[in-house]
Image: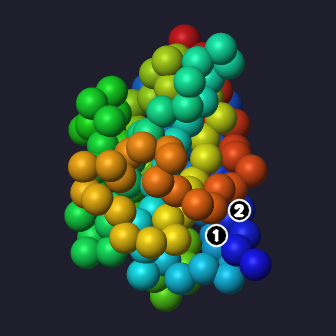
Amino acid sequence: QVQLVESGGGSVQAGGSLRLSCAASGYTYSSYCMGWFRQAPGKEREGVAAIDTDGSTTYADSVKGRFTISKDNAKNTLYLQMNRLKPEDSAMYYCAGAADWVLPSLVTEDWVYDYWGQGTQVTVSS
């Protein structure tokens, strides 16, 4: 059974940083595309960043240059380093894993992912 568990969320002031982690059991990070998503109250879930099996990364325009996705295959852990945080980054953040190959143009689409964590809350105050 696949289980993804996020951690690292919290409350920070604008301009601050946080690093989210997503630990997996029953799932091999090196084999599939992984992504980070977020959902703010009243808004749709949006893809933030994704990392494919070859290490290639994709970012939403809103976070480019501020967020960095990475993974440690040996530790089966996915990370999202978030710098220069803004109030509009406040949301519940989820990690997700695919169960099959994902077309590179779709790596930030939530419907291509099969496994999801429970989420970790990020709150950025102005």
Q: How crowded is the residue under tag 2: few (<14 C-alpha within 10 Å), some, or many (20+)?
A: some
Q: Amino acid at mark 2?
A: Val
Instruction: Work out whether residue 16 can be spotted.
Output: no
Q: Position of residue 6 (x, y in %)?
A: 67, 56
Residue 74: x %, y % from top left: 49, 87
Q: Quadrant of residue 90?
A: top right
Q: Quadrant of the N terminus?
A: bottom right
Asked if one can make out residue 26 in the rendered structure from this viewpoint, the answer is: yes
What residue did someone put label 2 on? 5
Point out the image quarter for the C terminus. top right
Q: Which residue is mark 1?
A: 23
Measure the C-alpha gap from mark 2 to mark 1. 5 Å
> Residue at point 58% right, 18% down?
43
Nearest the viewer among 67 and 46 is: 46
Q: Amino acid at mark 1?
A: Ala
Q: Are marks 2 and 1 in contact (CB under 8 Å)?
A: yes
Q: Position of residue 30 (x, y in %)?
A: 42, 81
Give the structural element (helix, strand or loop) at label 1. strand
Closer to the chain start, of discs 2 and 1, is 2
Which residue is found at the position 60% from the left and 41% from the top?
93
The x, y position of residue 97, in whole percent, is 53, 63
Q: Residues within 10 Å of mark 1 (few under 14, many from 20)?
A: many
Tell me, for residue 97, which label it has, or none. Answer: none
